[in-house]
Amino acid sequence: MWLALITVFSIPFGEVYGQECTILEAKQPYVMGLSKAIDVNLDQVEPVTLPVVFHVIHKGEGDVTNISDQQVLSQIPALDTGFRWGPGVDTKIQFCLASRDPDGNPTNGITRHNGVSLFGEEYAENGVANTSVQNGVNDQVMKEATGCWNPDEYINIYVVSEIGGNDADNGVQAYAYLNPTGDCRDGIVQLYNTTGTTGVVKEGKTLGKTCVHEMG
């Protein structure tokens, strides 16, 4: 099976170790985000499992925005399903929660941060800003303050209370940079109620496809 792959997400293939759930290694790097398609024989490609860390940036320990571990966990099978595309079509990309942090310590792949304690009323009222003209905490400031894990070794997903003051309702549901930034801006930002398939998930977002879309 030959498949022409065009995507705007860059996956760092190379020798990356330290994860119990994956070793990212390839004889030849597959560079994504190119201006033209490249042919890849997926029948000859070994599956690659990418470690994911979720940073839940909530508004208080008992607040609805501090979603459960179970809700976070439900996003992983949704990602796996999304990257299979359909019967007989498999991208050979799958996902797992990181089992080791950057220092090699065991982890469940979830970190939690009180955004109001870190950023004050700006986060409480508006969440994160995905553009320079929106209200909210600066995107890069938020990611660095909550301790982004090396984007060359992990996929960072930031679960936030709202984006640009949308009160987790309409408007931007999630976002990601289209090209590698080489710093903590790499990663996905999404609303708490578009994360996973169970728990505090709003109507129309119960299949976990928001994250699948941004991952693509």
Image (cartoon, helix red, strand yellow):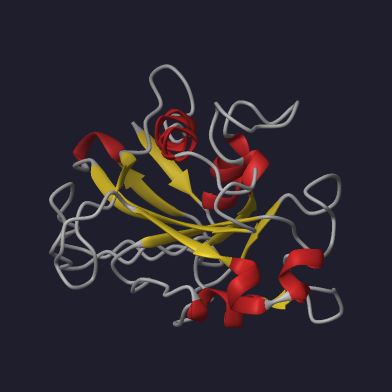
How many badges with numbers are in the image?
0
Among the 4 quarters of the image, the one containing residue 194: top right
**Position of residue 46 in the picture relative to residue 61 (left or right):** left
Among the 4 quarters of the image, the one containing residue 103: bottom left
Among the 4 quarters of the image, the one containing residue 170: top right
Q: Residue at x 28, y 49 (%)?
A: 108
Q: Is residue 156 above or below residue 143?
A: above
Given residues 13 and 108, the one toward you in this image is 108
Q: Residue at x 37, y 37 (%)?
A: 2
Q: Quadrant of the N terminus?
A: top left
**Position of residue 190 in the picture relative to residue 105 (left or right):** right
Find residue 54 and report its horizontal and vertical position in percent.
Answer: 44, 54
Residue at the far top: name it: 87
Find residue 155 and report its horizontal and vertical position in percent.
Answer: 40, 60
**Position of residue 189 in the picture relative to residue 128 (left or right):** left
Find residue 216 and report its horizontal and vertical position in percent.
Answer: 53, 49
Q: Is residue 147 above or below residue 21?
A: below
Q: Residue at x 60, y 57 (%)?
A: 60
Q: Is residue 106 above or below residue 196?
A: below
Given residues 15 and 103, the one toward you in this image is 103
Q: Residue at x 59, y 26 (%)?
A: 207
Find residue 63 and report its horizontal and vertical position in percent.
Answer: 64, 47
| Residue 42 seen in the figure | yes
Given residues 137 and 22, the one toward you in this image is 137
| Residue 177 seen in the figure | no
Q: Is residue 86 above or below residue 3?
A: above
Given residues 87 and 62, the one toward you in this image is 62
